[in-house]
Amino acid sequence: MSSERRAHEHWGFRTMSRIACVMMLLAATTPVAADSALRIEHVTVVSPERNQPLRDATVYIGQGRILSVSGGSGAKVASASAATVVDGHGLYLIPGLIDSHVHTGAVNGMSPKDETAHPDIASAAREQIPRSYLYFGFTTLVDLDSGPEPMARWNAHEVRPDTFFCGGAPVVDGYPTTWEPKEQRFQRRYLIVQKGDEAKMPKSLDTAAHTPEAVVSRMKADGMYCVKAFYDERELGPDVIPPVPRLETLRALVDAAHAAHMPVFVHALTTEAQSMALQSGADIIAHGLWEWTGEAQKVELTAKVREVLDEVVRKKVAWQPTMQVGYGFRDLYDPGYLSSPLLARVLPTALIEWYGTTEGQWFRNQVASGLPKELAKMTPEARWAWVRSEPAYVGMFSRVARTTKYLMSHDGRVIFGTDSPCAPLYTNPPGLNGWKEMHHLAEAGLTPLQIFRAATLVNAEAIDLSREIGTVEAGKRANLLLVRRDPTESIEAYDQIEKVILRGQVFNREELSAKRLRRQ
């Protein structure tokens, strides 16, 4: 049986079954909006399923859902009940944005030890992070490596985006366990022992509980919505090449996940890794093509790269560029980064100030240890200029931009995801990271309309949530944005948000800013 057939033969049944699962997850993890209805009048509706904006529209919302969308000033609403009225003159109503690659368990730039040493700073940061995603319009998130405890902690926030959680399933000693102490790796809840490797495992490990089938079953019981596999064959340090899942392991994981009606993401950022993800029948490739296996120095598209990308298009696999990951590592050297007014909107002052201390620079210093020693003698400004022109960064940015553009020009399913934070980086801030990602996509040649669709409907379709979110239509969840510009014409619309509507509840944007903490 082909991997393509395995991935799609039960698609209709899987989709219908997952709809019921989505409804239960939303009911269990999100508070119901207030009973009072909401009517938005004289607004221009911009929605990705429409060829043209619907002008002078009336949108009626109740119980956290869109009840009707009507055109014209004399439009009749779905109910005569009393409603709070929002004047939409001069505004555009659009779907809330989706970031389908985040990590909600961490405080940017802080290790668990740092959080223990500075509980007040960490607590304020954790309270702000969900609001910061909303500040930049992200009303739905997908956490790609979580578990029961971090999921419960995130869902305890009263104000937060709708969030769906994936279980991350690395193979023994594989990425991303490489940096963990050996004994800690075997404590991972969703660890996979590959067939034939059972005899190599510690006697304390129940290998039967760590087959792909057993791991997926445990994820499902834990309330995970999706599955993430990891294929990373890169050398991660001197003589450190982590093992990768064999194709039979990946296929078994995909088959088990699909049988449980769970989408499968594969962390894959090289041509070899993405080829394996495609053969496995996975639904989504997490990351763009940053590195080209065996063609490390090339930046012009090669035959091998085109072959992989054409297969992505043919199989209709969704693909996340996550460009901002690389820029996040580069931006650690920006001497003006911590004084950015944008950063002050999404992170508490105390946390930003801590980043500037010797203690807060721990990860930056760790990354910088790999740079040429003579750079230590340069001024911060000279070092920043050197890093921006450094061939490794420039080449990576060029490769991912070119491959993303190629996919979009060939009707590929590019979806929006940021991998925030991808590491203990303070340069991957919540919400703001998505705003920066949009600029990199635009620089790569994507149009505002393509970016809009990638962050709304195409993303919703890829993660099987298009019946709930992604468009402004009756019956959908009322996760919406009121913005002052048309996002199909300019990405600047996403920093001109007037109001965020979350499950029917209206927030003025400034209510969500970290700056509000200074006024309290």
Image (cartoon, grey):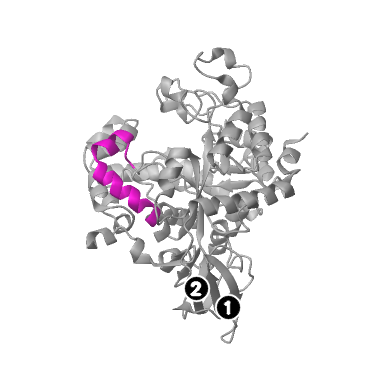
The residue singled out by tag 1 in the image is 79
Closer to the chain start, of discs 1 and 2, is 2
- For the residue pair 478 and 91, the one nearer the viewer reads as 478
Query: In x, y percent, where is residue 470?
Result: 57, 60
**Residue at the far bottom in the pictured view:** 74
Q: Residues within 10 Å of mark 1 (few under 14, many from 20)?
A: few
Amino acid tagged 1: Ser
Q: Is residue 416 magenta?
A: no
Find numbered disc 1 in the image and state the secondary structure of the residue it sits on. Answer: loop
Q: Quadrant of residue 23?
A: bottom right
x, y percent for residue 266: 58, 38
Residue 33 position within the rendered picture, expressed as x and y whole percent measured from the top left: 47, 64
> Quick check: marks 1 and 2 in contact, CB under 8 Å?
yes
Query: In this picture, is 487 found above or below 260?
Result: below
Region of the chain picked out in magenta, as a range: 109-131
Q: Is residue 42 above or below residue 423?
A: below
Query: Majority secondary structure of the magenta segment?
Result: helix
Badge 2 is on which residue?
A: 37
Can residue 129 be spotted in the picture? yes
